[in-house]
Amino acid sequence: MDNKMYQVSTLQALALGYSRAVITVGELIREGDTGLGTFEDVNGEMIVMDGHCYRADRDGNVTVVDPGTGVPFAAVAKLYGEQVFSLKDKPDITSIRTQLTGKIEEVFGLNSMHVVRIDGEFERVDARSEAPYRSHHITLKEVLSQTQTAFIFENIRGSLVGVYFPDYMDGINMPGWHLHFLSEDRSKGGHVFDVSLREGTARVDKITNIYINLPKEAAFDTYSLKQDLQDEIKSVE
């Protein structure tokens, strides 16, 4: 199956403060129906599911996003569900990531990219989002320290949507599993810090192609993207 990861800019550029629009939401969802990212000026957390783009605001409230909204960073793909399996009694995000990693290892996928969706019943979702902050060369860590709000959803049905990138692609995106949450009624969501899952069904696709749409304006060239930002990126995740 010919599937690709479509990525806007790089996580390293976002971490260093490049939060200008590269493409629009309408352009993004033509390239993939499942994934995540953020919006111009880091205005909330993006969840792409079933071909629709949602924004979780700083209070965790979700709305459908206008197609003309700017996107500085995102990663999306088409979800087919090559692997489908159940998860049960997962007390934290580490246990979920461990099972996901075990499943992709079975198909020799640790050095490939993956897209995932997990539909289920959650005991607790520990999440965050943020308000917009217009800046240039202000790091994401610094921005989030001023704009981020954390919140908890309990006893809620919904979906985790995310991507997996191998270690050697660090800087392009976050190595390992990066997950966002969207409630079943599409009213709550955010970037996931931790999660407790009662039971759910996962769908995962292995992806071996990537298209990266880099910013075209000259300002992008003023960012030093060769520096090691592993600690910086881990701190904001």
Image (cartoon, grey):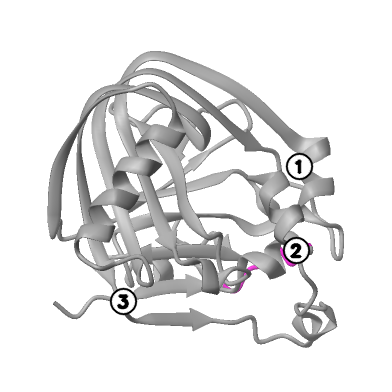
Is 164 on the left-hand or right-hand side of 231?
Answer: left
Q: Amino acid at mark 1?
A: Leu
Q: In the displayed structure, does residue 83 sit left or right of residue 160?
A: left
Secondary structure type for disc 2: loop
Label 3 Cα crowd, 10 Å radius (few <14 / some 14-19 / many 20+)? many
Q: Earlier in the sequence, mark 2 or mark 1?
A: 1
| Horizontal side of residue 152 vs 141, given as left or right | left
80 versus 235 height, above or below: below
Left or right: residue 194 compared with residue 19 = left
| Image marks 3 and 1: residues in contact by CB distance under 8 Å | no
Query: Which quarter of the rendered picture does the C terminus lie within?
Result: top right
Q: Is residue 65 magenta?
A: no
- Count of numbered circles in the view: 3
Whole-angstrom CA distance, mark 2 to mark 3, is: 26 Å
Comparing labels 2 and 3, the label whose residue is closer to the camera: 2
Question: Residue 42's x, y, as percent?
Answer: 67, 51
Residue 4 badge = 3
Q: Which mark is residue 144?
A: 1
Answer few, some or many: residues within 10 Å of disc 2's Cα (few below 14, many 20 plus, some between 14 and 19). some
Name which residue type carries label 3.
Lys
Label 3 element class = loop
Q: Which residues are magenta?
A: 17-22
Q: Earlier in the sequence, mark 2 or mark 3?
A: 3
Mark 2 = which residue?
A: 229
Does residue 65 appear anywhere in the picture?
Answer: no
Q: Position of residue 106 (x, y in %)?
A: 20, 59
Real-space Cα distance between discs 2 and 1? 16 Å
The kind of residue on which mark 2 rests is Leu
